[in-house]
Amino acid sequence: MLVLKTYSDTQMIFPTKKTNPSQSLSMILSLLALISYINIPDFSAQTNCDDPITYSLTVEASIPAATAGTTYRFYVNMLDPTDHMSAVFGNNESSLIINTPDGAFNAATNAGWSAAGINPAFLTVFPEMADDTYATIGLEGPASTSGISGASDPSIVEDVAQHITPYFLTDGATGLLSSTIIGASWYVLNDVANGLPDSDMRVLVLQVTTAGSISGRINYQVFPLGEGSNAVQRSLDFDGAGTYGAINPCGCTDPNAFNYDETAEYDDGSCIDIELGCVDEDACNYDSEANTDDGSCAVFDECGICGGSGIPDGDCDCYGNVLDECGICGGSGIPDGDCDCYGNVEDECGTCGGSGIPDGDCDCYGNQLDILGACGGDCISDFNGNSICDVDEIFGCTYIASLNFNSLATIDDGSCIYEECYEDEILGCTYSTALNYNPEATIDDGSCDGAFTSCPSDLSGNGNVGSEDILLFLMDYDLTCEEILGQ
């Protein structure tokens, strides 16, 4: 049986400027020769969906404590608290590559390739030690100060023809490569406690501080549930911060299926047929069995109809009604007999809700009755009451039997002339109270004179009180008796 002895940070395979150069070349060559016989089965490739994709890689970026640039920390994500981080490795089949073109920061105060040389007691004096570039398995400093029971610093092996430790020892190192058949690895044994996940279910395996970008490939081995016989290896490319290797290549590979996964490499039998319908739960026609939206989703219109078009143009509600002339939806309009929507009726002037002809007026236009009773007329006097306006009166003989009868005359002016056949008639004053009363007169000739006692209003003395009397009165109105008698 061949036994491989590994060396911790103080027993490195290759002496460097930070290490003890007393190691003999023969011991190094013997050790590398033994490494070439190691045969680790390759679990990095998944062949079917029964093989789970696990143990992804997370690269976190943060601001360094004391130096310029960015500090990148590499974590392997575990699935179970008993999962054990075994090793980080590189060889000709799975190259270990780290590219930092702007150089990696390596603190002069850390004399080793791992975190074992970062003494917490010196961090306050040399804060840049916290930014050092180092390899690790679950430790940020020496195992002895980690507080983890059963912790142990990791060990390293590397090909004499292709060193990886200088990357962790030389300030400004631009790259790490392990691609030979012998390869290289840093690791812990299965009984080392710092190989178990922390409270976040992950294990720190690498820290790099650089002023520029970082990329490459990292390979690592995990013992699920701590069982070495079930070792899982993963080989992942990385480029800056992010999570890598978390995509499951298993899924539905049918491009016509609802859940087609273009990233899937293996069909896991999960394909689901496309069911068209409305998939919006807020829609009124939501289809709980549909998985692909067909654009049919609808909402309730204002009438409560799913996908309806609402109240039609011209209607005022959802029942086909329209606005009546009073603006009432579905109303019957102005009632018979009314003239508007407020219960008013037309007055005698045709005004809706009007108050009719005002008191004193005779029509709807503001006119009044004149003296003759004509609405809007202009007559102001009719003293004889013959319904003919005084300004329209015509004087003349009004006796039909007279020779000079005037059919147009409205007031007799005493000018009537009679024929001889009336010679037996005696003309004169027929008013007994007149001063010149003629008891023999048969026809009053309008000559009566003096005061009348029996009919004082008959100024004309014709036995009638009429317009002639008014005219005579008006002729003498506003005159003195002396003036009247002197005429």
Image (cartoon, rainbow, N blue to C red):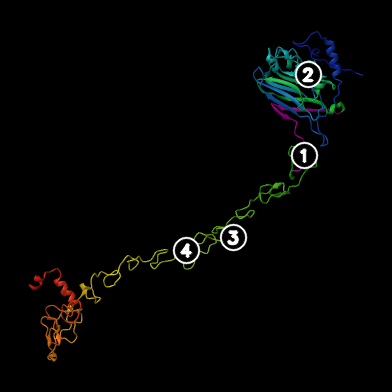
Residue type (three-letter) at the residue carrying disc 1: Gly
Q: Residues within 10 Å of mark 1 (few under 14, many from 20)?
A: many
Mark 4–mark 3 distance (CA, rounded to whole Å): 27 Å
The reply to whether the C-beta atoms of the residues labelled 1 and 3 are less than 8 Å apart is no
User: Does residue 341 appear to the left or right of 252 in the view shown?
Assistant: left
**What residue is pinned by disc 1?**
251
Mark 3–mark 2 distance (CA, rounded to whole Å): 81 Å
**What residue is pinned by disc 4?**
343
Magenta-tinted stretch: 230-254
State the image coordinates of residue 355 (x, y, percent, origin top left).
Answer: 39, 64
Local SS, label 2 = loop
Comes first in the chain, label 4 or label 3: 3
**What residue is pinned by disc 3?**
319
Comes first in the chain, label 3 or label 2: 2
Q: Which numbered tag is attached to residue 370?
A: none
Q: Quadrant of the N terminus?
A: top right
In this rendering, the answer to whether 35 lies above or below 369 is above
Q: Residues within 10 Å of mark 4 (few under 14, many from 20)?
A: few
The reply to whether the C-beta atoms of the residues labelled 4 and 2 are less than 8 Å apart is no
